[in-house]
Image: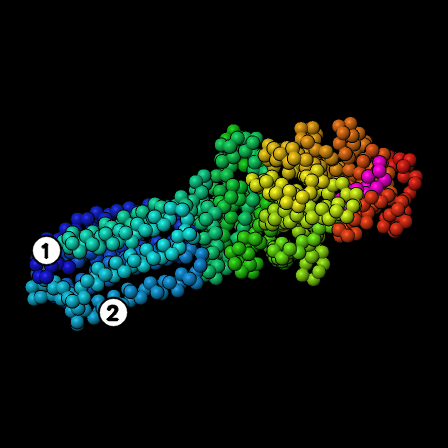
Amino acid sequence: MDGDGDDVDWHYETELVSLVLLVIIWIYSHEYKMGFSIRNRIFQSCYYTLFFSMTVNVLYLIMFTYHSHFVTWQLLAVWTVHQLATALCSTVCQLYVLAYVYENTTGKFLWNFLLSLLPYAGFLVLICLNPVTGSLLRLNGDGLAMHGPLYFLVYGIHYLYALIMVITIFSHLRSLPAGAPKTLLFIPFTITVVAVLQYLFPHIILSGYASVCVLLVAYLYLQNKRIWEDQLTGLPNRVAYLQTLNWRIRQKRPMTVMVVSLNDYKFINDKFGQANGDFLLKSISSYLKSVVSPKDVYRFGGDKFAVIFDENRINTCLTDISRIAERFNHVWEIPGNVCHISAAIGAAQYPASASSSGELVSMLESAVERAKYLGSAQPIFCDREIIGQIRRKHTLYEILRSALASNRLEVYYQPLYSISRDSFTEVEALVRIRDDNGNFLSPEEFVPLAEETGLVVEIGYEVLKQVCEYIRKLLQRGFPLETVSVNLSISQMMRPDFVPRALQIIRASGVSPSRIIFEITESLLVSNYEMISEKIRQLSDVGIRFALDDFGTGYSNLSHVIDLPFQMVKIDKSLIWDSMNNSKCYIMVRDMSKIFRSMNLTVTAEGVETADHDRFARICGCSRIQGFRYARPLPGEEAEKYLGRSRTELTDLGKISSFDAASHQMDVHPA
């Protein structure tokens, strides 16, 4: 690319230095095996393409410097290969940008991949025809290069790929991680600048040096092993783990995946200190690497490890999994001590258990949860039962999401019986959801899923809206409804906007806040006591009342009752039921009820279903009784028939079972 027959004093020192830098980057980057992905594969190909291009560059410069020692066809051949290799560098850069942008959308990447090859394919045809047409370059008898009429395309292809990169990046700005667009734009910027400088100063070869700079920047900011490596154990991290799963599934390569979830790791940290906890994690990772290949072990959570067995080890992986499970039956050594830690182990296969990475991860999580629930020291393999549970969860999620979106949530109301008034003036609101066949879902099934998916937040607000509307209508019609209790979830209370949003719903309805009782459990308080207690006080200040629900199932911490503005304590049904056969429980519940009454708290007995439960609640001095013996959760129009009525009236109407008059006097103290 000399200037029209002039002899040129070539400077190729930068190419030699760049070649050395490239080798150093290659050696350093190969200390760690990156995760499987199209992007990583293309990045690896950048090394080989660039190395080939720079080697050809040096050969090209040497031959043209000493052109008198070579025949014309040799010079023209090396020039052709040089141009193809240089253009290929820009092509590969564009493919890398595409792979980064379309990281998780293989179909779109493949389509754009093929389109991106078209300019290079056209340039390839033009280069191959050049010896015949001379449209790009021809050599005179002295071996000097003469530019053809289309020689500008030698630089034009680089400008074209730079433009395509810029368009690709700017059209996907919103989907790219923070900082990534600037790094990606450095690639076309460098290509453009170098192409211009090369045109202005053809005797100084900068293409290799610029390419190494681009590669180095991409490695440091986009491909750095810190992105893929867990800093404590040196294992591939969650990002690498998920990339590998996605890559193997796209390649349809069978595998068995095992997840090891440590039990009570926090206890180890608290007891022996964080340094010893870290030492334990490194010991476990070292052991796992001794059983299987180090590249197949991942740390994808604080106390979770994963092992991927490829298709070559599927038949032998059962032995390795059993061996790993057995190791957790023995102690682990830490500096100056030993400790014992158990693990829940789950395993699943692709494609037998799942058809996508998302399904596979769900299967593994369910298998681990089952192992934790069973307290099993043996691995739990994903079977048809677990697959059925996961599919059921997916079905339930769609039902919940659809019910919320189409406003198909139903609120039922369970009347509470006041012993002193012998009437029903309060109710508790309970959400009910029907499946596609019109059958009610069990709250024990859909409530935990709503919590897990976050849908419980919007469900809670919808219930509050319906409750406020129910109160407003009943009061307008003269019903003696004093309060409605509404259950709060931890997800709701943890939201920064919970207080203003709840108050906005109540005020918009025109209902007095004093008509609302929010029920919270002790487990909710434990999650973030300071923040939750502050929100309770804010809502109490405007008149909303609070009840401590399910007392006796959590920590049963009396300080919560003392420190926070609760007006009611609801004794969980498990304590009521256990008191029928356990004298210690009987005495405890009776005396605790007395303490609560002395603190001017309303005591409600939950789960009252039998005459014995009823009598015990009265003996304890409970003010309210809630349970199927008196009333089940009912639709709003049915629940309102209880309001203001005595038990005798409702018995006459056939709403509740006949009243045992002796229940006031009979003691049910267990023997």
The secondary element bearing badge 1 is classed as loop
The secondary element bearing badge 2 is classed as helix
Q: Residue 349's image quarter? A: bottom right
Residue 236, horizontal then vertical, whole percent: 44, 46
Residue 2, horizontal then vertical, whole percent: 12, 58
Taking the spot 69% from the left edge, 48% from the top edge, the residue there is 469
Residue 594, horizontal then vertical, whole percent: 80, 29
Question: On screen, 443 above or below 150?
Answer: above
For disc 2, the marked residue is 125
Q: Residues within 10 Å of mark 2 (few under 14, many from 20)?
A: few
Looking at the rendering, the stretch of residues picked out in magenta corresponds to 414-427
Taking the spot 82% from the left edge, 47% from the top edge, the residue there is 642
Q: Is residue 553 visible?
A: no
Please state which of residues 96 and 443 is positioned toward the viewer in this rendering: 443
Q: Residue furthest bottom?
A: 132
Please state which of residues 529 and 255 is positioned toward the viewer in this rendering: 529
The C terminus is located in which quarter?
top right
- Label 1 with label 2: CB-CB less than 8 Å: no
Q: Residue 353's image quarter? A: bottom right
Please tell me the numbered disc located at residue 8. Answer: 1
Give yes or no for residue 416 being in the magenta stretch: yes
Our reading of the magenta stretch's main secondary structure is strand
Taking the spot 56% from the left edge, 60% from the top edge, the residue there is 352
